[in-house]
Image (cartoon, grey):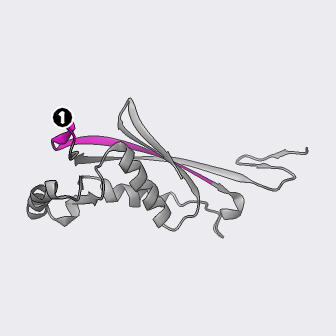
Amino acid sequence: MLLFIFPFFIVSRQRVIKMKLKTSLEFDSAHRLVGYSGKCSNLHGHIWHVDIEVDGCYEDVDSVGILWDFTNVKKIKDMFDHKTILKECDENVELIEAIRNSCGEDSLYLMNDNPTAENLCSEILKICKDLGFDLDFNIKVWESPKSYAEIEG
């Protein structure tokens, strides 16, 4: 098979040219877990680190030459940074109301599920897809320097 190697991709006779982008972001936020017996049931904060890997084909590149715009990272970060991330449920009603009253609606990010690293992976994947991209993503959410959850889709 004849191969030509270029700086960013390999062209072969199959003419399937795969591209991969990687980026990361960090955000500070507070959260608590409902129904969990342990320290994480209390409101506490993290510096979350998120790795985003985007897989696509060269055919997915737009007319400008962009597969996935890195400005999407800022959009995702702004959704979570310096927010209190909570499950929207009866157990959090008073806390949510107190935060709304003291800090404003913009200080909250409400989810259908507990804001675990696993569920934040799923939430960020959904956001990437909702931004209008039919690409494959690999998302890692690091809750600490040694612990992360990962999702592909």
Type of amino acid under label 1: Lys
Percent x, y for residue 149? 42, 40
Instruction: Please state which of residues 45 and 9 is positioned toward the viewer in this rendering.
Output: 45
Residue 65 figure quarter: bottom right
**Residue 106 shown left or right of residue 50 in the figure:** left
Residue 135 figure quarter: bottom right
At 84% from the left and 53% from the top, the residue drawn is 14
Percent x, y for residue 30? 22, 47
Residue extending farthest to the right is 1
**Residue 68 shown left or right of residue 91 in the figure:** right
Instruction: Please state which of residues 58 and 33 is positioned toward the viewer in this rendering.
Output: 33
Vertical side of 101 occupied by 91: above or below: above
Query: Is most of the magenta stretch helix, strand or loop?
Result: strand
**Residue 88 shown left or right of residue 59 in the figure:** left
At 58% from the left and 50% from the top, the residue drawn is 21
* Residue marked by disc 1: 39
Please provide the residue range marked out in magenta: 36-55
